[in-house]
């Protein structure tokens, strides 16, 4: 971070790059985020720590689109990535860069999935890691962290409480602080979602991109990516309107946006089953809000029951088992379409930030039990 | 199936295709199994039901390889695919072809993951499906099946018991039987693992491919793919030695291979935590054994404790949380390397058939709990 307490962002010499970098250069490159290495901060390829992350499918959601009178609806499926969530992108770049600058041991608070990703990528890189997560974080992420050999602690509180514990440990033990926006490289990894959406749509930007927003780094990253692509001349026209989706049980950015504020206020007693977006105050809230204002976007809060209903609808109509945060994305799209904020002919990309299989307790199932000689 | 009771296999006019099909043709095509459409049975692109499956990463396992004195070890990661297991490949092609031939409703027995994949792809295609699985199948697969709107039944027994119930239902209600090898298209989907391995290694075949074997369709498919590539002239030299991995608690194919038999015998009281390979008698056992004999391969049984140990080792050394069946693969490689059956310089590809996150109960974790004001 800057000594003033603000997050640092990575800057590239885009004017120089622009001179001889075209979309053609990407053809035939590997199917991972590293195809965009000119726009990533790792300088020596030897330091790249990769499990094949990136180039996740952009799936056409024709049936769901029809169900909400929307002709061009897509889901970017971040379930198909190592560790089963988009956090792998930030971890891949963050751990690679940590390796490059000589880090031995890192620490971070997490709502679960980021910790899982960072601990597994750290294991691959041979770094030690310390992870603190709320006791209510998805249980499977405990297994991922623990199995990787990281130091895992639970806290009887929220991610903000985990953050305080990590903040102190970082000072006490001189650890590398890998918390959201306390190092500038995670955002570079998440940025690749924006690069991929542009490339997968053949460099024609969609009208709207909708993102479930906790810490907001994904949205900040997508915004940064699109601006970089524009500077490079790979895309043209206005940027997509960016939409931040939160839960009615934790909506600090929605509240700030509705009040026209540039920063959010701490949301007390936050609660939602979409655990990844249970972040009462994001360090990068002002960057998220900038992105919304600058692109004529908006912020929308959705409730837990609507999330569960949409999750089932998506599975039944599109065959995809999305995570609750991903379902929240499509609730918001439905709502914005109903209100007319999204037009019928607009091209809309919704992010499913992780695999539904990471949240086994979200859905209760009670199937009929047969004995061996029973018939249907 | 054939009226004689044997499985049917799809045959292509390879001689004709060979005349003007080269590796160059694949460049720039989509990152999914459908890049190989000339070698898939769906005739009209309109019938393709896809969630972006395929082109899963072939990840270098340098650290684990070093741990077992093996210089060129790779993992093909089938966790990064819709529904989190390689079963998505068979379902994508199987459901697409079912759509093409006008099926409305299908039924199948499953150890969990195949049912999850087929029900979700069926939902996407608008087909009705009926799925019967053992009560001990991974619980998350119940959620996937149920959420997709399929008819889900559990049976107090094994997949062979589920198979009998489905067999009767298929006749009683005139359903399309999507059981393993009772339709010829699933194998075509799984075949794509072999096509991808060859392409990802730049058309230079590895020395050994190791596969966790339940029904064995993946292994049969890989073998078929490699033979087709050879006929097309895309690969040269001997085929890789194929290895079938089973559990010591359910090893009918290993037993048959050790006795030099062409078919396996029903394995009584089978049991293993690697549930996907708990198949006491595979309909395609003779095809699996053919593939092993024809390639100078072998069959290996590994025990559950070794699977758990290897799973932890893989997470700690490579940062990948593999499923128990995937861990079994690497136990077998370790064993064959120790015995000298695999040489130090040989190139070995092990299949991880699914995401570890689908099996939350495999690993027990008991982390320390902190209160809000605690320090580390």
Image: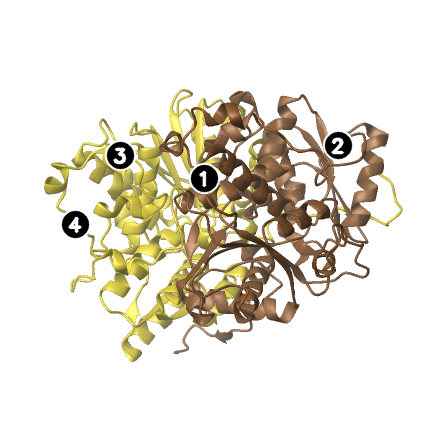
Chain colours: A brown, B yellow
Q: Residues within 10 Å of mark 4 (few under 14, many from 20)?
A: few
Which quadrant would residue A185 be assigned to in this image?
top right
Rendered position, A256 above or below A17? below
* Front-most of residues A306 and B79: A306
Quadrant the N terminus of chain B occupies: bottom left
Q: What SS does tag 2 mark?
A: loop
Q: What SS does tag 3 mark?
A: loop
Residue linked to disc 1: B329
Tags 2 and 4 in contact by the CB under 8 Å rule?
A: no
Q: CA distance from mark 1 to mark 2?
A: 44 Å
The total of numbered circles placed on residues is: 4
Residue linked to disc 4: B11
* Front-most of residues B186 and A309: A309
Which of discs 1 and 2 lies nearer the camera? The answer is 2
Where residue A338 sits: x, y (%)? 53, 71
Residue linked to disc 3: B295
* Front-most of residues B322 and A129: A129
Where residue A363 sits: x, y (%)? 58, 67
Q: Residue at x 59, y 62 (%)?
A: A328
Q: Residue at x 36, y 66 (%)?
A: B108
Which of discs 2 and 4 lies nearer the camera? The answer is 2
Q: CA distance from mark 2 to mark 4?
A: 61 Å
Q: CA distance from mark 4 to mark 3?
A: 21 Å
Q: Residues within 10 Å of mark 1 (few under 14, many from 20)?
A: many
Which of discs 2 and 3 lies nearer the camera? The answer is 2
Residue linked to disc 2: A1
Q: Residue at x 74, y 57 (%)?
A: A256
Where residue B97 sits: x, y (%)? 26, 60
* First in sequence: mark 1 vs mark 4: 4
Q: Residues within 10 Å of mark 3 (few under 14, many from 20)?
A: some
Describe residue B4's horizontal placement relative to residue A270 as left or right: left
* First in sequence: mark 3 vs mark 1: 3
């Amino acid at each position: 971070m800057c000594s003033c307490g603000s997050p640092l962002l990575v800057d590239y010499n885009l004017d120089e790059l622009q001179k001889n970098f075209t979309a053609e250069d990407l053809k035939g490159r590997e199917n991972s985020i590293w195809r965009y290495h000119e726009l990533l901060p790792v300088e020596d390829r030897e330091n790249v720590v990769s499990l094949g992350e990136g180039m996740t499918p952009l799936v056409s959601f024709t049936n769901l689109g029809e169900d909400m009178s929307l002709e061009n609806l897509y889901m970017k499926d971040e379930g198909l990535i190592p560790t089963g969530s988009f956090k792998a992108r930030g971890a891949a770049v963050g751990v690679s860069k940590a390796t490059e600058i000589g880090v031995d041991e890192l620490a971070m608070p997490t709502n679960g999935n980021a910790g899982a990703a960072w601990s597994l990528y750290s294991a691959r890189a041979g770094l030690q890691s310390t992870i603190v997560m709320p006791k209510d974080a998805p249980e499977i992420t405990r297994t991922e962290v623990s199995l990787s050999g990281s130091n895992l602690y639970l806290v009887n509180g929220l991610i903000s409480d985990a953050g305080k514990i990590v903040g102190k440990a970082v000072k006490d033990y001189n650890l590398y602080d890998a918390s959201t926006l306390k190092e500038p490289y995670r955002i570079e990894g998440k940025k690749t979602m924006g690069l991929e959406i542009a490339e997968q749509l053949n460099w024609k930007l969609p009208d709207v991109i909708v993102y479930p927003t906790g810490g907001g780094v994904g949205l900040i990253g997508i915004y940064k990516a699109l601006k970089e692509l524009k500077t490079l001349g790979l895309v043209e026209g206005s940027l997509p309107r960016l939409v931040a989706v939160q839960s009615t049980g934790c909506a600090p950015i929605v509240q700030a946006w509705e009040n026209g504020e540039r920063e959010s206020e701490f949301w007390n007693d936050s609660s939602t089953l979409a655990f990844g977006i249970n972040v009462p105050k994001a360090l990068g809230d002002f960057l998220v809000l900038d992105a919304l204002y600058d692109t004529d976007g908006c912020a929308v809060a959705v409730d837990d029951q609507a999330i569960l209903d949409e999750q089932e609808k998506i599975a039944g109509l599109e065959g995809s088992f999305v995570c609750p945060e991903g379902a929240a994305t499509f609730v918001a799209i439905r709502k914005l379409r109903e209100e007319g904020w999204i037009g019928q002919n607009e091209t809309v990309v919704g992010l499913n930030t992780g695999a539904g299989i990471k949240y086994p307790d979200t859905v209760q199932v009670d199937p009929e039990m047969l004995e061996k000689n029973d018939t249907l």
